[in-house]
Amino acid sequence: MGDLLRIIIAILLPPLGVFLQVGLGKHFWINIVLTLLGYIPGIVHAVWVIAKK
């Protein structure tokens, strides 16, 4: 699966995008918390995780 598709998924559902990139690691749980605190921080974190790997 390409990074562009993961980024699109991350914009729609940030935790799913992070899960597809790193699995059930610490970044997934951080993203869950950020998404619950606000949708935009979850998106930013998800795109960051996908872009850095």
Image (cartoon, grey):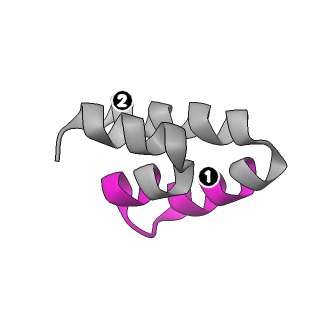
The quadrant in which residue 3 appears is top left
Q: Residue 50 in magenta?
A: no
Three-letter code, disc 2: Ala
User: What residue is shown with label 1?
Assistant: 31
Q: Report if residue 32 lies within the magenta region.
A: yes
Contact? badges 1 and 2 (CB < 8 Å): no
Task: Report the disc number at residue 21.
Answer: none
Residue 26 place in picture, x, y as percent: 54, 61
Q: Position of residue 25 (x, y in %)?
A: 46, 65
In this rendered view, identify the residue nearer to me: 45 or 17. 17
Instruction: Tell me: 38 left or right of 21.
Output: right
Q: Determine which quarter of the picture holds residue 29.
A: bottom right
**Which quarter of the rendering shows the C terminus?**
top left
Under circle 1, the secondary element is: helix
Dominant secondary structure of the residues highlighted in magenta in the image:
helix
Vertical placement of residue 52 versus 18, above or below: above
Magenta region, residue range: 18-34
The span from disc 1 to disc 2 (Cα, nearest Å) is 15 Å
Tell me what residue is drawn at x 53 percent, y 50 percent.
13
- The number of numbered badges drawn on the structure is 2
Q: Is residue 42 above or below residue 40?
A: below
Q: Residues within 10 Å of mark 2 (few under 14, many from 20)?
A: few
